[in-house]
Amino acid sequence: MKISKFFKNQKVYIWKEDFVVAKAKRVLPGVFAVIKDKNEITVIIEESKIKKKDVIEMEKGWKILTFDIVLPFELVGFLAKISGALAKARVSIFAISSYSTDHILVKKKDLPKAIKALKGLGFKIENL
């Protein structure tokens, strides 16, 4: 499966809200995502919904970018190509995969560089 066809003119949506990535004391309601492993609970939640009493540590100032593409499981290298372009632009990412697609979080301050890098791969960028 040729990866380049998954970039040309495909949409990436930028969420209007600002998000927090936090190590939480419990699974919180109303989150974008929860990752629970044997060591910790990580939540991604809108900054306006976070309560300091519910978290152990948090990192504020993230924007979510959602790739509006249904990605087949056998596709190899999708995130590698994206993370490589963003690394070249000096943009750190926090990646999350859902069943059908991928999402990345970038720091709000790095959003202009991320947009430029993704456009360079052929994506169309839209706001939600």
Image: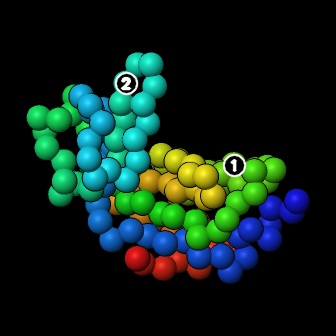
> Could you say whether the residue bearing mark 2 is in a helix, strand or loop?
loop
Q: Amino acid at mark 1?
A: Ala
Q: Is residue 117 visible?
A: yes
Three-letter code, disc 2: Glu
User: Which residue is under mark 2?
Assistant: 40
Q: Is residue 64 left or right of residue 4?
A: left
Where residue 70 is drawn, which disc sits there?
A: none
Q: Nearer the viewer, residue 37 or 109?
A: 37
- Label 2: few (<14), some or many (≥20) within 10 Å? few
Q: Do labels 1 and 2 touch, CB within 8 Å? A: no
Crowd rating for badge 1 (residues with CA inside 10 Å; few <14, some 14–19, many 20+)? few
Q: Residue at x 13, y 39 (%)?
A: 52
Q: Is residue 119 visible?
A: no
Q: Position of residue 38 (x, y in %)?
A: 44, 19
In the picture, the quarter occupied by the N terminus is bottom right
Q: Which residue is mark 1?
A: 80
Q: Quadrant of the C terminus?
A: bottom left
Q: Is residue 10 left or right of residue 14?
A: right
Mark 1 or 2 closer to N-term? Answer: 2
Query: Which element type, helix, strand or loop, lies under badge 1?
Result: helix
> Compared to 19, does 28 lie above or below?
above
Q: Position of residue 79 (x, y in %)?
A: 66, 51
Q: Quadrant of residue 7?
A: bottom right
Q: At 21% from the left edge and 33% from the top edge, which residue is drawn?
A: 55
- Residue, x 29% and y 60% (percent of image)? 18
Is 77 drawn above or below residue 16 in the view shown? Answer: above
Residue at the farthest top position: 39
